Amino acid sequence: MQNVLIIDRVSEKFLKELVKRGFNVEYRAGLERRDLLEIINKYNILIFRGRLKIDREVISAGEKLRVLARYGVGLDNVDVEYAIKRGVAVVNAPNASCVSVAELTIGFMIIVLRNLYEYISLVKLGKWPKGSFIGRELYGKTIGIVGFGRIGSRVARYAKAFGMNILVHDVRNVSRDVEELGGRQVDFEELLKQSDVVTIHVPLTPLTYHMIDYYELSLMKDGAVIINTSRGEVVNARALIKHIDRLGGVALDVLEQEPPRDNLYHQLISHPKVIVTPHIGAETIESMDRIADELLHNILDAVKWL
């Protein structure tokens, strides 16, 4: 029997399916790193989200570890190379949250362009600010999609339905797929210069770290909107603060520091043009169910080879 330790919140469905398949499951959502290091040597499978770094120290302490399972998409908090060298399989659920993240991106666009955050906040305070903020439509605007993978391509399809013009930048040649949606694949600088909305859908790598920095932000139009639902480290927060006053708005589901502690992030979050949500892109009932199904399948595949 495989001993499984789960250190972050997962769906009830996922827990039941693991038990049903004969796994010995210990569910300790919110477990601190120091406690994880003390007990991980008892487990064969570790299931986690993005809260803790699963680095060399953690992996080395897990003497019996055979599978690391990320309940979600990103693996940037995992030392994948070291895990593989140690003979530990690394699995995730890369397809499950695409719809939820793409829908959140569209929701951000509407909230920012229509100034909904300001209106809703003021009405809750007992005011009636009709006419205080004049919004903008998505129709006819140019959306620049950075990264045309599972999520970026879905955002493009949604944007087309809203009548937006589509520009895409990707390190791969995806021009045929983009053109089928009526869009164009362009270089990064052209996308930044031409887009009314820039939305980011890339993994965190050495190439994408701070890919949106002082220079890149200087290329964007006055009044342009920037959205990040990928990884916080992709956008330099200091650069964003410098340019925020001339931008039309910023919507972030991710930050470099989560939860934010430094004054830099409090300065960013408190700015009236900025909307921040606490990394909720995948947090829908449907997405959680799909993650459960996909990750369980991938864990079972990995276990076959143990």
Image (tube, rainbow, N blue to C red):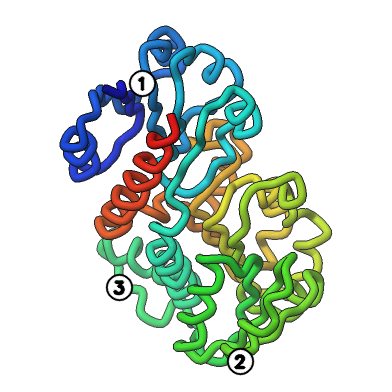
Per the model, the C-alpha gap separating discs 2 and 1 is: 48 Å
Q: Secondary structure at mark 2?
A: loop
Residue 52 in the image: x percent, y percent? 48, 28
Q: Give the mark nearest the N terminus, 2 or 3.
A: 3
Which quadrant of the figure has residue 191?
Answer: bottom right
In the image, which is nearer the foreground, mark 3 or mark 1? 1
Tell which residue pokes out farthest to the front in this image.
305
Question: Label 2, on which residue?
Answer: 182
Quadrant of the snapshot with the C terminus = top left
Residue occupying the point 47% across, 41% down: 91
Tell which residue pokes out farthest to the top in this image.
38
Front residue of 233/246: it is 233
Question: Label 3, on which residue?
Answer: 128
Residue 31 badge:
1
Per the model, the C-alpha gap separating discs 3 and 1 is: 45 Å
Q: Hey, what amino acid is under mark 3?
A: Trp
